[in-house]
């Protein structure tokens, strides 16, 4: 994730939970990962990379986990700090995060690893995360996949949100081309104070098939343990394990 995306999330941080928290299965995410921890007899410690406002990590903290969090957006980090008072915090990207110890579990939620634009970049990122894991530790992440990444597709969507402080409309236009997914997202925020604000982002993400992602996990030196619907419904959840 580049600085541009970081600034985009900075501008939306104060509205993020109202916009999305109710629609994201954070409880299912916690239960899914905690079940894996118990299955593989791992200690209760986790790093959430791309933690956003800390909504997922808060559940682990409440369950007695030692928690670490990292995000590229300074404002998302600020919001996460308000929720997760015990977590150790880093402002970092996927490729440079390090908390000074090896961990049993690293998670990346909400399609965050799609910011890796190529299989090479995704492999490099997963290899870096593997280096932060204990022997037998797990990387758990959800990632939107497509059957044919080379196929050209178009997506258009408009949504409206009624928030406590504002009316918000969101327009999304996305197109997949040559293994890249480029999207234009525009929020028009009509504050109840009558002030109007427009926030726009153009982002290019990687476009991967499920097989692509599994190969990247293997090339990163991890063992693919599971590909399932996991906790994000139609979005696949991937689990890779570090060597013992």
Image (cartoon, rainbow, N blue to C red):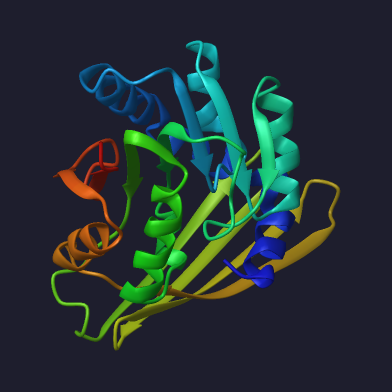
- The residue shown at (47%, 44%) is 132
Q: Is residue 164 visible?
A: no
Q: Is residue 216 left or right of residue 23?
A: left
- Residue 15 falls in image quadrant: top right
User: Is residue 13 shown above or below 181?
Assistant: above
Foreground residue, 24 or 163?
24
Residue extending farthest to the front is 244
- The residue shown at (67%, 20%) is 86
Q: Position of residue 158 (x, y in %)?
A: 45, 64
Q: Quadrant of the N terminus?
A: bottom right
Q: Position of residue 114 (x, y in %)?
A: 40, 64
Foreground residue, 167 or 141?
141
Q: Position of residue 61 (x, y in %)?
A: 55, 18
Q: Position of residue 133 (x, y in %)?
A: 41, 40
- The residue shown at (26%, 20%) is 35
User: Is residue 151 shown above or below 133?
Assistant: below
- Residue 41 falls in image quadrant: top left
Q: Is residue 226 left or right of residue 64?
A: left
Foreground residue, 203 or 155?
203
Q: Is residue 13 left or right of residue 50?
A: right
Foreground residue, 70 or 20?
70
User: Is residue 87 shown above or below 238?
Assistant: above
User: Is residue 207 shown above or below 223?
Assistant: below
Q: Quadrant of the C terminus?
A: top left
- The residue shown at (43%, 69%) is 116
Give the mark count.
0
- Residue 107 falls in image quadrant: top left
């Amino acid at each position: 994730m580049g600085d541009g995306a970081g600034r985009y999330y900075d501008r939306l941080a104060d509205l993020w939970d109202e916009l999305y928290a109710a629609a994201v299965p954070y409880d299912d995410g916690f239960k899914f990962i905690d079940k894996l921890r118990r299955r593989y007899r791992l200690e209760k410690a986790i790093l959430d990379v791309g933690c956003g406002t800390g909504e997922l990590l808060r559940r682990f903290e409440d369950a007695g986990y030692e928690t670490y969090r990292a995000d590229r957006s300074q404002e998302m980090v600020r919001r996460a700090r308000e929720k997760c008072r015990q977590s150790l915090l880093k402002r970092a990207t996927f490729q440079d995060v390090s908390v000074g110890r090896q961990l049993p579990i690293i998670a990346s939620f909400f399609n965050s690893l799609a910011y890796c634009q190529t299989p090479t970049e995704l492999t490099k990122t997963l290899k870096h995360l593997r280096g932060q894991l204990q022997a037998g530790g797990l990387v758990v992440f959800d990632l939107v996949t497509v059957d044919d990444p080379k196929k050209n597709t178009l997506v258009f969507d408009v949504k409206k949100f009624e928030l406590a402080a504002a009316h918000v409309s969101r327009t999304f236009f996305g197109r997949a081309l040559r293994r890249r997914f480029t999207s234009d997202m525009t929020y028009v925020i009509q504050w109840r104070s009558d002030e109007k604000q427009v926030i726009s982002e153009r982002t290019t993400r990687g476009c991967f098939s499920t097989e692509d992602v599994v190969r990247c996990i293997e090339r990163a030196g991890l063992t693919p343990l599971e590909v399932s619907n996991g906790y994000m419904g139609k979005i696949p959840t991937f689990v890779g394990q570090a060597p013992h």
